[in-house]
Amino acid sequence: MSASSYMSTEPVPRAGIDCGRSAFTLLLKPFFVSILLFSCAVPAASQTAVECLIKTDRQEQFLVVQAIARSEAAVSGRYRLILVTHSAAGTSQSIQQGSFDLQPGSDGLLAATMVDAADRTELTARLLIETDRGTSRCGLPE
């Protein structure tokens, strides 16, 4: 019997690999999975249509901090503003939170506070806005 006419009757183990699939199919699967993952990872600001903004205005040795939300559509939700100041005197933290309702195409002042901002005072601010459409975040420094 020649080696070319020999046929095995025992199954060959394949270790879970489907040899019937083409390389093209194997390459497409990760591509489509990545498209699905990317479509779910769209930034929150574009999904929520709510823009957050932190404005500051210096008045002598104080800094006025305003948390503002903007929306093109009517929306309601909750906000949380966290301020942390570091100075020679130490560290201070302030948290303001509450509910809000915005009319279409309007800006809403969510919170305003005055911080002692003498020389060499560092301010960190974070604003979190949560609505039924998602979450928006912004901060200082950006």
Image (cartoon, helix red, strand yellow):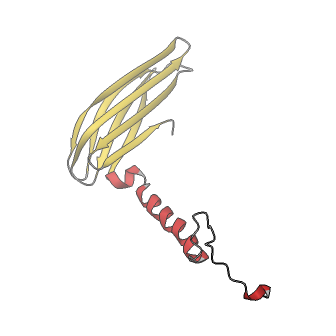
Q: Which residue occupies the foreground of this view, 40 or 19?
A: 19
Locate the N terminus by quadrant.
bottom right
Residue depicted at x 32% and y 47%: 134
Please tell me in which quadrant of the rendered image residue 58 appears.
top left
Q: Which residue occupies the foreground of this view, 23 or 62?
A: 23
Residue 135, how many percent across, how many down? 35, 44
Residue 121, how many percent across, how many down? 53, 21
Residue depicted at x 55% and y 20%: 119
Q: How many marks?
A: 0
62 over 109 or under it: above or below: above
Left or right of residue 100, residue 122 in this image = right
Residue 25, how many percent across, how many down? 54, 75
17 over 64 or under it: above or below: below
Left or right of residue 72, residue 41 in this image = right
Residue depicted at x 35% and y 33%: 66
Find the residue positioned furthest to the top. 89
Left or right of residue 76, residue 120 in this image = right
Residue 61, how many percent across, how many down? 46, 20
Q: Which residue occupies the foreground of this view, 76 or 32?
A: 32
Residue depicted at x 43% and y 40%: 138
Find the residue positioned furthest to the right. 2
